[in-house]
Amino acid sequence: MGDRSMTAAIIRNAGPTQATAPFDVEAVRADFPILAQTVHGKPVVYLDTGASAQKPRAVLDAMERLQTGSYANVHRGAYAFSAESTRLYEAARETVRGFINAASDHEVVFTANATDGINMVAQTWGRANLGSDDAIVITELEHHANIVPWQLLRDAVGCEIRVVPITADGALDMAAFDRLLDSRVKLVAVAHCSNVLGTIQPVAEITARAHAVGARILIDGSQAVVHGPVDVQAIDCDFYAFTGHKLYGPTGIGVLYGRLEVLETMPPWKGGGDMIESVTFEKTTYAEPPARFEAGTPAIVEAIGLAAAIDYMQSLGMEAIAAHEADLLRYAMQRLASVEGLTIHGTAAPKAAVVSFSIDGIHPQDLSMLLDRYGLCLRAGHHCAQPLMAKLGVTGTTRASFGLYNTRADVDALVGALERAREILL
């Protein structure tokens, strides 16, 4: 039987019970063409937004308009199509700047995804600033994308990696974090929100503590930007990475925010066109940020799609989205509490609408495959967080991650399917 006291705690701490602004979820669902599809003859219940979100018509249309109306390469052409594509591409950068409240659009670097951005920091800033006497602090909550790049850096320069443990309910152990901080720490790298547990970290507080010992901080925001407002100036972080496809935008586009004074000191990671001021066979001088870090033809169409996704979310209201998802999370906890043998992993508040769980005697992969028969799309496995799975004492979990288009009916469908799955598999 799952731990009902822990479930009760998360119900209490899920957030406001009602939206702060009207949120018409049925109208929202109509904006997502794929939700009208069926899976195995059943209505689709998409509960894998944490892996990749579905795309609204506004995003699909924006990308199609560019490709059929004025597509050309950016920054290089003197003709109308190129000028318009360049205008839209740089306007997308400004949209991102406003979305995260960066001080300047020069602080917004377009990347392939969050993983690309984190690797860029490791291979540029990290190699230039870390050596064998230095340390990096990460946490037990991290996605592999915020672990492996630092291990590669460690293997290259000999720095130390220190890991902050989490508490039983899935929160960061802040006392242990403080014990790990000293003058050797040059970088702290943390997830804003756990992709497994949904735990939202106190990143402004973590940043202040990192800066107090002279360390820079990188935040993996892939799971956070989709669930509520993010203000990088208020957080005061040095780097913030996120990816477009979890934000209802296309794949192949991500963002690395970097404090301008830091970006200006960083060497380029990739060489090629558009990241230079001048090139001779003897010497190359590099462009200022962000162009210095965007070698080659960028993901032009995808950047426009990302901007359209941000515009769409902001038209609904980030606070309204957060309140809607908080209601879904609370309702899901209440309903899942009725499933015999179900254990929820991660009950610390505040928590995003991400629920990982196990059912006694049922392998997560078997469960997910059976749920698929009923039209439910859930993630199963280690969720690119194997060290966290080891901490939890499991090889994997089943994860339901909710988005702005999900409803209480989706939760009911999940619970009903879980009850049927128990009857079949046990």
Image (cartoon, rainbow, N blue to C red):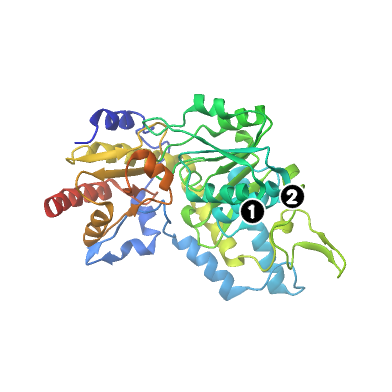
| Quadrant assignment for the N terminus | top left
Residue placed at 74% from the left, 65% from the top?
274
> In front: 35, or 203?
203
Q: Residue at x 68, y 72 (%)?
A: 73
Relative vertical location of residue 239 with respect to residue 85 in this rendering, above or below: above
Q: Identify the amino acid type marked 1.
A: Met
Secondary structure under badge 2? loop
Question: What residue did someone put label 1 on?
Answer: 120
Residue at left offset 61%, top offset 50%: 155
Residue 195 visible in the displayed image = no
Vertical side of 67 occupied by 109: above or below:
above
Q: What distance separates the C-alpha of mark 1 from that of mark 2? A: 10 Å
The residue beneath circle 2 is 266
- Residue 263 image label: none
Q: Residue 8 at x, y = what percent?
A: 27, 29
The amino acid pointed to by label 2 is Met
